Image (cartoon, grey):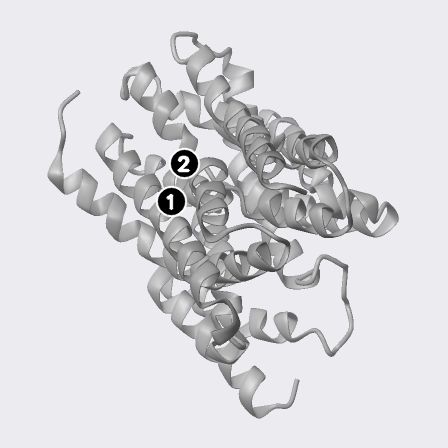
Amino acid sequence: MDNANIWLMIIGVSVASFTPRIFPVALFSRYEFPAVVKKWLSFVAPAVLGGLTALSVFAPQGRIDFSVQNIYFWAFLPTFIAAVKFKSLFVTLLVGIVTMAFLNNFLGF
Amino acid sequence: MTVQNSEIRQGIKEAFPIVLGYLPLGLTFGVLAKDAGMSAAQATMMSALCFSGAGQYIAIGIMQAGGGIVTIVLANVLVNLRYLLFSASTVPYLKDRVQPLAASLLSYGLTDETYAVAVNRYRKQPATASYMAGLNLTSHLGWIGSTLIGAFLGSFITNTDRLGLGFALPAMYICLLVLMIKRRADLWVAFFTAAACLGIGYLFPATMSNLSNIIIATILGATLGVLINGQR
């Protein structure tokens, strides 16, 4: 891909990126959603996080991996316990990163 | 619109874990973009204009496979479709609190991570433009900065795996998920969506590459939430 085409590609991708982020807020900010729609939307965040967590743990390389060699699953366990126990983003992140560094460096994964 | 310093600071503070998680991803993107034939300026501008981890990685992949602009843009339309849902679900929190123009412009910085952190806060505290600016702009700068470093240092960066930073984003999702579970129905919705996401991805592997499994699973999960929550 030549230089001009790369710039064109970047502009195309940016339009595809910001349109779905901005438009719902721009269009609906003056509009009151019906109660049932609001309720539905209130479940989007827990749903998305459930999905993202599952994918980041069980498909870290973009393919689903339920094997015992999946290091992300082993790092998930202490991290999840830390999250439930401390309910702190900082502590959870620390436990997750340290666990992952430990698995990567010492356990030969 | 009044600028509230404490809200900006709060947003910046809450962006730190996000920046930490973006660091290895942005560095790697910078390195890969250079490999795929982009200049450091192009890689950095792409991170500034697109701010889409999955979308940018896909663009690089298609470029290296010899694909064209149309393929890349279409793949990005699919990958970014989930933000329609995310963005719409922030509307009830932003309405009457953040001016529509400011809310729309600041939503440029909506990502999986800024969305999850922000909704967690909006459930406890009213949304403000200052908080949104602090959170989204800091995260965005982290993404741009790490891309720039990756594009320049390219070959010097060998392996960030050893630092364990690869688990920063999963750890963040895990914690935000735990914090997000307030109603009994939230737990069922999260669990169901997680299973549906993996199930759809397993049965139809093509959905994994454009993240359409997340969109389908989220729509099903939120609908389940309304059904079980409405009965009580």
Name the image quarter holding the N terminus of chain B: top left
Q: Amino acid at mark 1?
A: His
Q: Amino acid at mark 2?
A: Gly
What residue sits right under mark 2 in the picture? B109
- Disc 1 secondary structure class: helix
The quadrant where residue B232 appears: top right
Please give left or right for residue B135 compared with residue A35 in the image.
Answer: left
Where is residue B185? Give x, y as percent.
57, 39
Is A7 drawn above or below residue A60 in the view shown? above
In terms of depth relative to the viewer, which is nearer, B21 or B203?
B21
Look at 64% across and 70% down and name the residue there. Answer: A73
How far across and how far down the image is residue B12, in percent? Answer: 25, 48
Residue B196 shows up from this direction? no
A78, above or below B85, in the image = below
User: SS for tag 2?
Assistant: helix
Q: Are marks 2 and 1 on the same chain?
A: yes
Residue under pointer 1: B140
Residue found at the very far right of the displayed protein:
B203
Foreground residue, A33 or A106?
A106
Q: In the image, A45: left or right of B17?
A: right
Q: Earlier in the sequence, mark 2 or mark 1?
A: 2
- Residue name at image x 54 percent, y 32 percent: A17
Are the residues flagged by discs 2 and 1 in contact, CB closer than 8 Å? yes
Q: CA distance from mark 2 to mark 1?
A: 7 Å
**Residue sitting nearer the eye, B58 or B7:** B58
Q: Nearer the viewer, residue B159 or B176?
A: B159
